[in-house]
Image (spheres, rainbow, N blue to C red):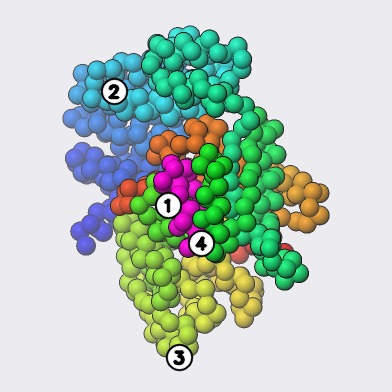
């Protein structure tokens, strides 16, 4: 309970004026660890402005919180203040490293690289190289990079990254002498940079293994395989968009269903070992076969549909495109903690694997942030009477919100009935699949404070979406389904990764943060340290109310 009391105190800014500096500093660190950056900045700023014993550390942590919240200019000003007022602070090397990071974010690459040069020979030298490589890989302006080469060309990371960009798409015949010089000076691998394969300009090869069911009767399978057809159509649209950006992707399609023998035959073909990326298959049995092939030949494999992180367990070459169940739950819990008061929750969940995983991750995240779960109950919607009793017996007094993780009609009807009669203003978080339950009207949901978790949310008002809708409809005489959006986003996103980092882009992903997609509001990476994995994961999971319904329910599968 002491921990909860502390977190409650952190939400009261006036206490910062009366508590001692040590407590204020400790609170600021806790808020920073909880990723509550604005609150951390508010807590630390008074200490940074004073000349006390915590001033230097508070200034550094304030700058770190500002950077993480996207306020690079504020971080920069605080770091300058730190340098001027505390030049002999023992952590100045960390401050220099952070300043370089800020300068990179401000697109001041020259000053950032100069600052990192000052860290040579220090314990942070290796970290400095990683930071340098990450931002240099993001720089796709060749004239600007060539300017950096003129000043920092003797830096191995700068030079090698430039060589990577040359063989990754920048190469022109007149670059041959420059590339040879870089290989010789920095002892780079000639096979990687000067071989015939490295010089080829045919583009990047991507194998698509999806259940097209080409050998089945079209009349009986057309509707069943429509989602695959839509996904591939989206990929083709992304292929065209990438081509306009100068990124040439070759798509090689293979009919890969649930039969493992068929998939093994496809993977045994000679060309598969030279693929730069494999997308699919979608079924678990065949996906595991492709995962083993990817690990054996060091080829990255994208699983396009599953939300189960176990499909990537122990294999650094397998990546998930869908937002995992764990991430959806953590994002929803974070949203609830930040937006609902009091910070107490009632959680009910169905006795299935995914719903149980959802509920456990939701509870852990909510409690980690400082919330309290008063009820955590498993239900079986197949048992109608027991489910109704479970909801009727709930006490909602003092509860900040309810979370129900079940897509079944029984759970949905009992939850809405309970709230209608006892607490219509109590926020409810649940799946957006409830919108498809015919027994509940939109008027009922509109009357309640329901928040829908919508991982496949596409903003229909976005100008890029409107353009895609127009082009897709014109090309296929049909509106795009959610699978068409997913196919486009997937190839467009990973196609750029291949272009920027090459086929072995794994190492670069650990330092990549949340970034906006074309249709999906954010794509990021979750460090699955317990499995030694770095998994792509759509970390931005929209939580939408009914007034956003037209944005939530994207085009149904045709």
Residue position marked by numbered label 4 in the rendering: 260
On-image quarter of the N terminus: bottom left
Task: Assign a secondary structure to mark 4.
Answer: helix
Along the viewing direction, whichever of 555 and 23 lies nearer the viewer? 555
Residue position marked by numbered label 2 in the rendering: 125
Name the residue located 59 percent from the left edge and 35 percent from the top edge: 204
Q: Position of residue 307 (x, y in %)?
A: 48, 59
Q: CA distance from mark 2 to mark 4?
A: 48 Å
The answer to which of marks 2 and 3 sits earlier in the sequence is 2
Give the residues in magenta.
282-304
Residue 130 showing in the rendered view: yes
Residue position marked by numbered label 3 in the rendering: 385
Residue position marked by numbered label 1 in the rendering: 292
Q: Position of residue 548 (x, y in %)?
A: 62, 59
- In the picture, the disc for residue 77 is none
Local packing at callout 4 (Cα closer than 10 Å; few below 14, some 14-19, many 20+) is some
């Amino acid at each position: 309970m002491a921990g909860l009391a502390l977190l409650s105190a952190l939400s009261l800014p006036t206490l910062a004026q009366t508590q001692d500096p040590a407590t204020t500093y400790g609170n600021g660190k806790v808020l920073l660890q909880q990723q509550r950056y604005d609150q951390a900045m508010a807590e630390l700023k008074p200490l940074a402005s004073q000349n006390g014993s915590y001033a230097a550390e508070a200034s550094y942590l304030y700058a770190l919180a500002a950077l993480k919240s996207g306020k690079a200019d504020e971080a920069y000003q605080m770091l300058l203040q730190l340098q001027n007022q505390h030049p002999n602070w023992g952590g100045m090397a960390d401050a220099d490293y952070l300043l370089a990071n800020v300068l990179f974010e401000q697109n001041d690459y020259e000053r950032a690289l100069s600052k990192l040069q000052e860290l040579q020979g220090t314990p942070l030298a290796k970290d400095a190289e990683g930071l340098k490589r990450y931002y240099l890989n993001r720089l796709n302006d060749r004239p600007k990079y060539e300017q950096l080469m003129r000043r920092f060309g003797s830096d191995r990371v700068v030079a090698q990254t430039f060589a990577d960009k040359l063989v990754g798409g920048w190469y022109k015949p007149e670059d041959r002498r420059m590339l040879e010089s870089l290989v010789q000076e920095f002892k780079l691998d000639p096979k990687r940079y000067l071989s015939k394969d490295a010089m080829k300009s045919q583009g990047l090869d991507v194998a698509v293994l999806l259940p097209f069911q080409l050998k089945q009767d079209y009349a009986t399978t057309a509707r069943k395989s429509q989602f695959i057809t839509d996904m591939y159509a989206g990929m083709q649209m992304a292929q065209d968009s990438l081509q306009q950006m100068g990124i040439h992707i070759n798509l090689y399609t293979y009919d890969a269903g649930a039969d493992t023998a068929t998939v093994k035959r496809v993977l045994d073909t000679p060309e598969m070992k030279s693929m730069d990326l494999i997308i699919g298959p979608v079924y678990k049995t065949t996906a595991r076969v492709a995962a083993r092939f990817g690990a054996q030949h060091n080829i990255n494999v994208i699983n396009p549909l599953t939300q189960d992180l176990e499909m990537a367990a122990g294999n650094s070459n397998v990546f998930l495109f869908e937002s995992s169940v764990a991430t959806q739950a953590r994002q929803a819990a974070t949203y609830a903690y930040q937006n609902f008061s009091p910070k107490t929750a009632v959680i009910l969940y169905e006795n299935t694997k995914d719903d149980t995983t959802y509920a456990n991750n939701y509870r852990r995240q909510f409690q980690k942030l400082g919330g309290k779960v008063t009820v955590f109950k498993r239900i079986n919607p197949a048992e109608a009477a027991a489910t109704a009793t479970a909801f009727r017996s709930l006490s909602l007094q003092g509860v900040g919100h309810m979370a129900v993780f079940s897509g079944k009609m029984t759970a949905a009807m009992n939850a809405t009935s309970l709230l209608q009669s006892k607490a219509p203003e109590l926020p409810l978080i649940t799946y957006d699949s409830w919108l498809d339950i015919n027994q509940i009207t939109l008027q009922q949901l509109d009357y309640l404070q329901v928040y829908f978790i919508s991982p496949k949310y596409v903003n229909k008002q976005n100008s890029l979406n409107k353009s895609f809708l127009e082009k897709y409809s014109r090309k296929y005489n049909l509106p795009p389904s959610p699978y068409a959006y997913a196919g486009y986003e997937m190839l467009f996103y990973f196609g750029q990764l291949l272009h920027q980092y090459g086929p072995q882009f794994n190492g670069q992903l650990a330092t990549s943060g949340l970034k906006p997609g074309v249709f999906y509001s954010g794509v990021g990476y979750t460090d699955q340290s317990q499995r030694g994995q770095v998994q792509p994961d759509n970390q931005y999971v929209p939580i939408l109310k009914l007034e956003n319904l037209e944005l939530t329910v994207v085009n149904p599968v045709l």
